[in-house]
Amino acid sequence: MKTVVDPSDGCVKRCFDPTDKVYQAFNFDTMDNQKIIDNSVELRIDEHIAGYQCTA
């Protein structure tokens, strides 16, 4: 997550760069809720096609 300084008030603000792959931890109640989840938007077409390939 990148940050920039807002020129109007001088405060540091977070900004999102859609080209970055971001891993950021949040404060959860339990360790079970802190699982890493792949939520990338890449299409896994090759894996999908390979799953349907049959050897007859």
Image (cartoon, grey):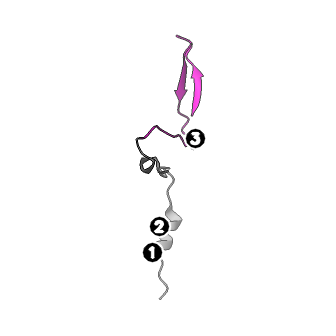
In the rendered image of this protein, does residue 26 appear above or below residue 36? above
Q: Mark 3 points at which residue?
A: 19
Q: Give the answer, above or below, for where 44 lies relative to 26.
A: below
31 sits left or right of 4 in the view: left
Q: Answer yes or no: do the residues labelled 2 and 1 have beta carbons within 8 Å?
A: yes
Q: Is residue 24 magenta?
A: yes
Relative to residue 46, is residue 21 depicted above or below?
above
Q: Mark 1 points at which residue?
A: 52
Tell which residue pokes out farthest to the bottom in this image.
56
Residue on which the image places disc 2: 48
Query: In the depicted view, which residue is nearer to us: 8 or 24?
Result: 24
Q: Is mark 2 on a helix, strand or loop?
A: helix
Secondary structure beneath label 3: loop
| Cα distance in 3D space between marks 2 and 1 | 7 Å
Magenta residues (range)? 1-28
Q: Residue drawn 47% across and 82% down?
A: 54
Amino acid at the residue labelled 3: Thr
Q: How far apart are marks 3 and 1 (CA)?
A: 31 Å
Residue 18 at x, y = what percent? 54, 39
| Amino acid on which disc 1 is placed | Tyr
- On whether residue 22 falls in the magenta region, the answer is yes
Q: Position of residue 41 (x, y in %)?
A: 48, 50
Query: Which circle's residue, 3 or 2, is located before the other in the chain?
Result: 3
Q: In which quarter of the image is the N terminus?
A: top right
Earlier sequence position, callout 3 versus callout 1:
3
Indicate the quadrant where residue 29 lies: top left
Q: What element carries label 1?
A: helix
User: Between 14 and 28, which is closer to the camera in this rendering?
Assistant: 28
Residue at mark 3 to residue at mark 2: CA–CA distance: 24 Å
Location of residue 48 in the rendering, given as x and y in whole percent from the top left corner? 47, 67
